[in-house]
Image (tube, grey):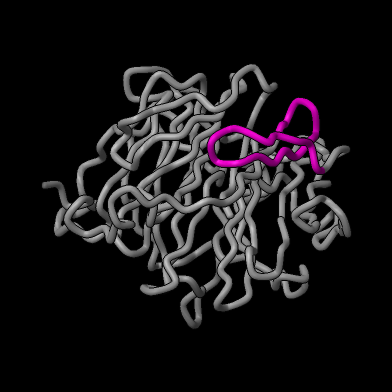
Amino acid sequence: MSVVEAARAKVPSGETRSGRLFFLELSGGRIHSMNPDGSGAKVIVTGCRFPDGIVVDAQAGHIYWTNMGTLNRKDGSIERADFDGSNRKVIVPEGVTHTPKQLHLEKHSGKLYWSDREGMRVLRANLDGTNVETLVQTGEGIDDSRDATRWCVGITVDPVRRQIYWTQKGPDNSGLGLILRAGIDVPEGEDPANRTDIEVLFDELPEPIDLELDVKSRVLYWTDRGNPPFGNTVNRAAIDSPASKGGMPEIVLSDLMEGIGIALDAPSDRMFVTDFGGSVYSAKLDGSAKRVLLYAQGNLTGIAYA
């Protein structure tokens, strides 16, 4: 039995929770919603400006998403709407964040966390968009922003150990991708550009994109957009391994068409994945029982499960 199987608390045999999936269509600027089996698909929001990351607040009935905006301008934004797409509102306006990518909701502290690619930052804010803080700064200025090794893309949070995890994807298929970890707050007396608590968990990755953490099993999952055999995959690793950089990564899903978004439903032993080729997949957490829920849906990015 693997460390993942031993650690994860499962739903009793034969039981699977229902719910709703929300996913982003970058090419059409739309947000889709559907049942976890692929049925009941519908468009709930239109007119998004290159949407990339999405999270859900099931208790409040809200979805939050990032708009990358025009890549050479600092005009990204973050919006919120109800589950049916109504009551749409900009909470982080243009000019605050450059190219916001993956988004994470930490409900207990009432914070949104996101990675800003060309902005070369990891940020957070209150759920209403106020009190924007920079937690990590990997570069500054136009010259640095051209260096893809500085680009922050994926983001997730461990509220138990009070740590953040993020990806720096590197150039396409370069083998320079990183997954890093640091405390949830900037250490006292330090600043986002000069933190002494940042550690590299994994390096030499093809092109890591989105992150999700199964907090209960202490296992990190991520998509990689790079070329096969290590790219076009979903990977996972135990993050509390005594090994210096965490447990060895395990490829659990392959043959994606540029994997982007990932969402976990750990209690039901399943994941949902999107790729840039336009497909939505479901699978068990070990990658078995892979199923294509939708295909040829445009260029898909973020996905969230409620």
Q: Residue at x 51, y 28 (%)?
A: 171
The verdict on residue 163 being magenta is no
- Is 306 on the left-hand or right-hand side of 98? left
| Residue 139 appears in the picture as rendered | no
Above or below, 292 against 103 in this view is above
In the picture, the quarter occupied by the C terminus is: bottom right
Image x and y of residue 159, in percent = 44, 72
Q: Residue at x 30, y 33 (%)?
A: 252
| Residue 145 appears in the picture as rendered | yes
Q: Residue at x 34, y 30 (%)?
A: 289
Above or below, 274 against 228 in this view is below
The verdict on residue 41 being magenta is yes
Q: Residue 133: name its quadrant.
A: bottom right
Image x and y of residue 92, in percent = 80, 60
Q: Nearer the viewer, residue 39 or 30?
A: 39
- Is 185 on the left-hand or right-hand side of 42? left
Q: Give the magenta range.
A: 25-44
Q: Residue 223: name its quadrant.
A: top left
Q: Residue at x 75, y 36 (%)?
A: 42
Image x and y of residue 130, in percent = 77, 73
- Is 193 on the left-hand or right-hand side of 270? right
- Which residue is the extreme one toward the bottom? 188
Q: Residue 106: name its quadrant.
A: bottom right
Above or below, 191 against 39 in this view is below
Image x and y of residue 179, in percent = 40, 47
Q: How many marks?
A: 0
- Which residue is the extreme one toward the left? 1
- Is 196 on the left-hand or right-hand side of 273? left
Q: Nearer the viewer, residue 81 or 155?
A: 81
